[in-house]
């Protein structure tokens, strides 16, 4: 058995979309929701998913920096109501499975949230047998409702996530079916001189000034997105710090492309536990944390 | 030698800020000519030139004082700006905020001194009623406005440096 496994990493941003106004803002309350989930008992943490699967947030640890919060942990998931006989590789002998129908093999899915002043990032390992970023968001969506109910507040928004593309940016833009939103981020130095930036007077502002261009309903702004990207790469406009494009890819999945993630690696080799065959949690989490370092 | 200071100043200045500065100076200059009173215009030019002499000598003194403050003051913020780099590049090296302020001040002192000399000598060489006299007055008014605006910007920059908010 090999000592390491290669795990792909998916980069996402978590956003809450208001029902009435459709305004999208980063879901900063995720830290409170995680704290709430961790305060629940094992049964309370469980969440039923489709295809006879369930999952629960096993653990999460928050580390605070000056202006960022990094929360890393893992989910446990299992497929229940599935108890076929066991077969031995060496002898070919079969025997009834000793587990109960309500039991399943534990699959761990490691994740890390990075909460900055302007974004909430979710970096998650891709484990086909575990849970996906979509299911993690679904999980937190359900528990956000419970958390708000416990506080006597209504939930009037949906939590959505955007995958962050890491391939060739221009090709990715061209391959998208529709682009409904393009954002250009300008450095806040634009507000004044180098001395003003030095004086820390603008430190209470978010890192960047954001210009959002939205498409009319059912129309597409691919050309504008390409123009924005060209201005960014040609450096004709030095104050542009990044460009983000949001829309739908060929499969109709919502995708966000961000120039900050263009050159990011998307897989990692992790040691596996010789007894259980699972990836080593400590190593996986430290790799995920390393991936979050450049997310700003 | 002097040209080098001008060149360095334009290389370390923000194009937009420079454009705004020159536009305001040009606008003021154009309005002086547009709204001029044809009868008393020559008299006003003479008044401007004589006032400019005292104003510019005051300004030179003020800017030199600011320059001295920057190079002699022992202030942690001033020590810090020596290491904080701007996006401007001079001779293949990024310019620090400290050097940027120094260059701007030297440029202002230089232009102010040249203007002072020009205003002192103006009555000897030009007649306010002639076309050449008016053209040179125009240049004088433009540069005076430009340098006062540059001085204001520099004072504000120094103010920001000295009053940095420490988190």
Image: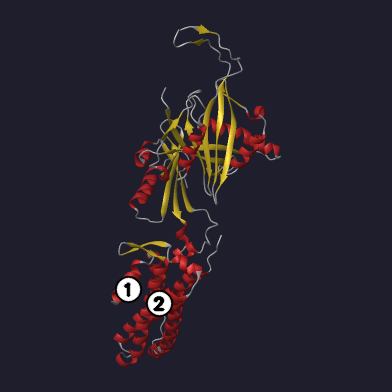
What is the CA distance from the residue labelled 1 to the residue labelled 2? 13 Å
Q: Position of residue A177 (x, y in %)?
A: 40, 35
Residue B96 lies in quadrant: bottom left
Q: Which residue is mark 2?
A: B147
Which one is in front, B90 or A221? B90
* Residue A173 in the image: above or below residue B80: above
Q: Chain of mark 2?
A: B
Which one is in front, A3 or B40? A3
Q: Which residue is mark 1?
A: B6
Q: Few, some or many C-alpha atoms within 10 Å of disc 2 (few <14, some 14-19, many ≥20)?
A: many
Locate the N terminus of chain A and report the quarter of the image it occupies.
top left
Q: Is residue A28 left or right of residue B135?
A: right
Q: Are marks 1 and 2 on the same chain?
A: yes
* Residue A153 in the image: above or below residue A139: below
Q: Earlier in the sequence, mark 1 or mark 2?
A: 1
* Residue A6 in the image: above or below residue A261: above
Q: Chain of mark 1?
A: B
Labels 1 and 2 touching (C-beta < 8 A): no
Task: Describe the element under mark 1 as helix, strand or loop.
Answer: helix
Residue drawn at 30 percent across, 62 percent down = B92
């Amino acid at each position: 058995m090999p000592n390491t496994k290669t795990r792909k990493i998916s980069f996402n941003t978590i956003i809450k979309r208001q029902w009435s106004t459709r305004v999208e803002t980063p879901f900063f309350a995720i830290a409170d929701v995680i704290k709430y989930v961790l305060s629940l008992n094992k049964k309370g943490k469980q969440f039923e998913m489709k295809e006879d699967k369930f999952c629960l947030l096993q653990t999460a640890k928050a580390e605070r920096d000056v202006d960022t919060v990094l929360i890393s942990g893992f989910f446990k998931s299992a497929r229940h109501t599935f108890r076929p006989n066991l077969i031995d590789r060496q002898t070919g002998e079969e025997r009834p499975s000793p587990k109960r129908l309500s039991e399943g093999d534990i699959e761990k899915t490691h994740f890390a949230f990075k909460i900055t002043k302007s974004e909430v990032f979710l970096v998650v390992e891709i484990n086909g047998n575990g849970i996906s970023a979509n299911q993690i968001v679904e999980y937190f969506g359900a528990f956000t409702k419970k958390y708000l109910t416990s506080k006597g507040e209504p939930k009037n928004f949906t939590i959505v996530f955007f995958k962050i593309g890491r391939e060739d940016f221009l090709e990715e833009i061209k391959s998208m079916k529709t682009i409904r939103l393009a954002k250009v981020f300008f450095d806040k130095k634009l507000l004044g001189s180098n001395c003003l930036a030095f004086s820390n007077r603008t430190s209470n502002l978010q890192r960047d000034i954001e210009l959002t261009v939205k498409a009319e309903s059912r129309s597409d702004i691919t050309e504008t997105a390409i123009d924005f990207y060209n201005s960014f790469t040609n450096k004709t406009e030095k104050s542009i710090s990044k460009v983000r494009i949001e829309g739908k890819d060929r499969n109709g999945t919502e995708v966000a492309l961000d120039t900050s993630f263009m050159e990011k690696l998307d897989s990692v080799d992790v040691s596996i536990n010789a007894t259980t065959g699972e990836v080593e949690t400590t190593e996986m989490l430290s790799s995920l944390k390393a991936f979050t370092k450049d997310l700003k | 030698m002097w040209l080098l200071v001008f060149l360095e100043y334009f290389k370390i200045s923000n194009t937009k800020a420079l454009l705004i500065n020159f536009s305001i100076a040009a606008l003021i200059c154009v309005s002086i000519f547009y709204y001029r009173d044809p009868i008393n215009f020559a008299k006003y030019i003479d008044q401007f030139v004589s006032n400019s002499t005292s104003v510019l000598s005051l300004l030179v003194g003020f800017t030199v004082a600011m320059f001295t403050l920057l190079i002699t003051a022992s202030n942690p913020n001033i020590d810090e700006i020596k290491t904080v780099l701007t996006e401007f590049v001079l001779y293949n090296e990024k310019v620090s905020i400290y050097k940027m302020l120094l260059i701007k001040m030297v440029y202002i002192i230089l232009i102010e001194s040249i203007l002072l000399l020009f205003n002192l000598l103006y009555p000897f060489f030009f007649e306010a009623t002639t076309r050449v006299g008016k053209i040179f007055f125009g240049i004088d008014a433009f540069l005076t406005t430009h340098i006062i605006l540059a001085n204001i910007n520099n004072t504000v920059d120094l103010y920001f440096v000295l009053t940095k908010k420490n988190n």
